[in-house]
Image (cartoon, rainbow, N blue to C red):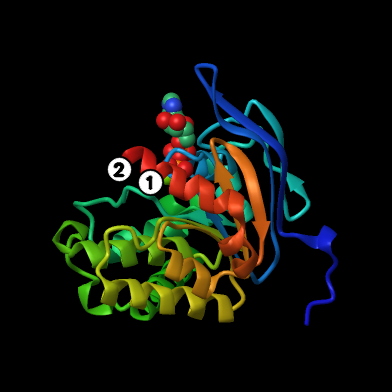
Amino acid sequence: MSTRGADQSLLRTSGLTKHFGGLPALEGVGFSAERGQVTALIGPNGAGKTTFINCLTGILRPDRGSMVFDGRELSGLPPHRIARLGIARTFQNLRLFSGLSVLDNVLCGLSARAGDSYLEAFLRTPGLRHRERRLWLTALETLDVFGLADRASVPADALSYGEKKRLDLARAFVSSPKLVLLDEPVAGLNPDETDRVGALIRQMCRGGATLVLVEHDMDLVMSVSDQVVVLDGGRRIAAGSPEDVRCNPLVLEAYLGKISATA
Ligand SMILES: Nc1ncnc2c1ncn2[C@@H]1O[C@H](COP(=O)(O)OP(=O)(O)O)[C@@H](O)[C@H]1O
Ligand SMILES: [Mg+2]
C-alpha cells in the first residue's frame, strides 16, 4: 500500500478552462491522477476529453487554470518539453508515420526523451553508437510486449487497424513515461482486439505505469480503472470509484440524454 498522501498525485489540474470561439470545451476542470493507478476520463462525445489531453500535452494552451505534473506547472511549456518530463500519449485518430517501418515508429517514441548532441551525432562517437543500440533493443523488446515483433520491418501502413492501435500504444510506452494518456485505445476494435488491449493496459499497470484512460467502452473502463472522472459539456459532473460513477444519476442522464437526443 502506498504511503503517499493525496497531495502526492502525479497529476493535478484545477480550474482548467479552454474555450473555442467563446464556446466552452473545458470549464474549470479539476482532475487528479494518482501514481500507479488508472484514472478513466469519460463523457459523451464533445465533452472535452481530447481537449483535456491536448492541454496536458501542450498542443493546446488553456485559457485558465493549472496543471501540476510531478510537482511542476505544465502551463506554457511546449509539447517537446512536456514529453521530456515523462508524459506520453496515444491518439484518438491514429497518427503513425505510415511510410516508416513499425520499428522506426516506435523509435520515434524514444527520440522524444533522448538528448543526443548534434556534435555527437556528427562524429558518430562510440558512446552514441552504444546508446543507439540500446534504444534499438528497447524498441524491439517493446514491440514484442505489444505483439508486433514479427511486424517490425514492415511499413506501418501495412498493419491491420488493430495492429496500428497496438503500435500507437507501443510508441507511447516505449520510453517508460511516468504518465500515459490513452485517447480511446480500443475505439473501432473487435472484441478480441479489445480484450488484448485491455490485457496490455493491465500489464502496464502492474509494471507501475500511471494511466489516464479516455474511453467509451464501459466494460473496459469498469474493468481496468481505479477512479473515474466524468465530463459533460466541458464540466466535471462526477468522480469516484467505477461503481459509484456507474450508478450516479447525473452520469446516467448525461449519457442517456445524449442517446435519446440522437435517436
Ligand atoms: N480545435 C478545435 N477548434 C474548435 N472547436 C474545437 C476544437 N477541438 C475541440 N473543439 C470543440 O470542443 C468541444 C470538445 O471537443 P473534444 O475535446 O474533442 O471532445 P471529446 O474528446 O470529449 O469528444 C467540442 O464541442 C468540439 O467541437
Ligand atoms: Mg475525443
Q: Which residue lies under the disc numbered 1? A: 259
**Which residue is most to the left?**
158
In-image side of 88 versus 30 (left or right): left
Asked if residue 175 is positioned above or below residue 60 in the image, the reply reads: below
Label 1 sits on what residue type? Ile
Position of 166 with respect to 51 (left or right) is: left
Report whether 194 appears left or right of 128: left
How far apart are the two marked residues, 1 and 2, measured between alpha carbons? 6 Å
Foreground of the two, 206 or 192? 192
> Looking at the picture, how far across and down is residue 186, in whole percent?
35, 63
As displayed, is residue 24 above or below residue 141?
above
- Looking at the image, which is closer to me, 175 or 193? 193
Where is ligand 1, by quadrant? top left
> For this rendering, which residue is in front, 238 or 69?
238
Report which quarter residue 115 is drawn in.
Answer: bottom right
Residue 138, numbered circle? none
Q: Quadrant of the C terminus?
A: top left
In the rendered image, is residue 93 in sight? yes
In the displayed image of the protein, which residue is found farthest to the top? 21
Does residue 118 appear anywhere in the picture? no
Label 1 residue SS: helix
- From this view, report whether residue 65 is shown above or below residue 52: above
